Image (cartoon, rainbow, N blue to C red):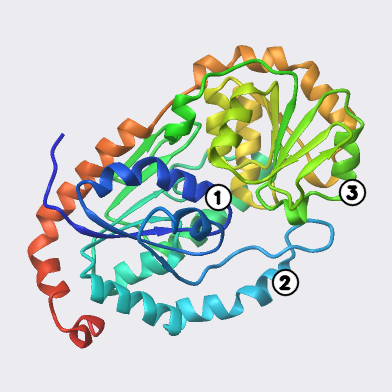
Amino acid sequence: MERGLAMRIAWGVMGYGRGHAMRTMSVLPELMKEHEITVFTAGDAYEVLAPKFPTVRIPMIGYRYNDRGRHSLPKTLAGNFGPVADLLFKGAGTAQVDREFAERGIQLVISDSEAWTHRAAQRLKLPRISFDHVGILAYCKPHFPPDLWALGMRDAYGYRALMGVPERILISSFYPAEPAYPGVRIVGPMLRDEVLRAKARRGDYLLCYFNKGEHQFLPHIDRALRLLDVPVVIYGTPYVGKVDNLDFRAPSNEAFVNDLAGCRAVLSTAGNQTIGEAIHFGKPILAMPEDAFEQRLNASMIERMGVGMAGDLKNLTPSDVDRFLANDESYRSHMREHARDGRAEALDTLRRFIAELSVARAPEVARRARKPMGDALSV
């Protein structure tokens, strides 16, 4: 595999939820053997990545919730007013990112749906690579079901307006799509070392994962799960301990992967990373999407692929789960044709992209990176 010069890289990671951090962790250790990489992130991703990698905390845009566990538009707008203003009008957070880039001599940006690093690269004229799942909406030909078409086109346009079109685009997805731009490469899910080490087993329990369980695990969800005739292991809530048939567990990468490998089936919010890992282990998925287009599309694709069922987080009933479990053998029969591990291909592609961009831009970028800080910030 062609490898270019060693580069000083800023790696932006969207901080909302843990999926972006898990994708980053699957490739970052190998690339750090070849390049000097600093992670820029916030929120949940900061808590996951900061203990393991050089990490800078930055602002974040994220959803806010109402008392019913759903996204609240008024609260989201109010809660993100400051960060969005910072991003659009070059506030203190933007200045911090520029300063960190200058002090570290950043030469290239890789971003997983992270807006501050994307826009810093545009502003400082640094080459950039997009590496995420959302790119399947923004940089691929539309593949949305009719009931989601308008929302999909809106979100794709909004993402491109915020992030632009990077020089190179790498998309990790549990389902395929057709690129709409040159320089786009699509690979399978990023399977972490913990996932690759684990062996699939057939247990009797349902594994539940909520990416924002402090908001999503509401009384009707608790009731629906307690009324099931199967044990339930739950991650992502503020609770720990056993109550009736429910076993609430604290966050742990190793323990979660072990429980995922050994469960009967999965009930989860509809994040790309969790779905890809569940398919790898041959576990049917009852996908409970948040009120976000990407998750709603993921749930729709699960049904289209025949590996699970789309559910309704705000109206879940025991009969929904029973119906899902009654069809688990049918879902399991479709798993093998869809199981993919995109990590090796992603690493090869990232190395190639970095080499191409380092050859094309290294002299100019190196000259800019070594200017005094004041000059660098004025570029």
Residue 202 in the image: above or below residue 152: above
Residue 138, position as x, y percentages in the image = 46, 51
- Look at label 3 and name its amino acid: Pro
- In the displayed image of the protein, which residue is found farthest to the front? 241
Q: Earlier in the sequence, mark 1 or mark 3?
A: 1
Distance between mark 1 and mark 2 Cα atoms: 22 Å
* Closest to the observer, 58 or 169: 58
Which residue in the structure is indicated by mark 1?
18
Task: Using residue 106 as the reference point, say whether residue 262 is left or right of it.
Answer: right
- Mark 1 vs mark 2: give the one in front: 1
Residue indicated by mark 2: 75
CB atoms at circles 1 and 2 under 8 Å apart?
A: no
Residue beneath disc 3: 219
**Going from the N terminus, do you reach mark 2 or mark 3 first?**
2
The amino acid beneath tag 1 is: Arg
Q: CA distance from mark 2 to mark 3?
A: 22 Å
Residue drawn at the location 49% of the way across and 50% of the way down? 20
Q: Quick one: label 1 or label 2, which is nearer the N terminus?
A: 1
Query: Badge 2: how crowded within 10 Å, few (<14), some, or many (20+)?
Result: some
Q: On the image, which quarter does residue 253 sit in?
A: top right
- Per the image, label 2 sits on a secondary structure element best described as helix
In the image, what residue type sits under mark 2? Lys
370 lies above or below 339: below
Contact flag, marks 2 and 3 (Cβ < 8 Å): no
Would you say residue 296 is visible in this rendering?
yes
Q: Position of residue 374 (x, y in %)?
A: 22, 88
Farthest left residue in view? 363
- Residue drawn at x 47%, y 32% is 194
Q: Is residue 180 left or right of residue 319?
A: left
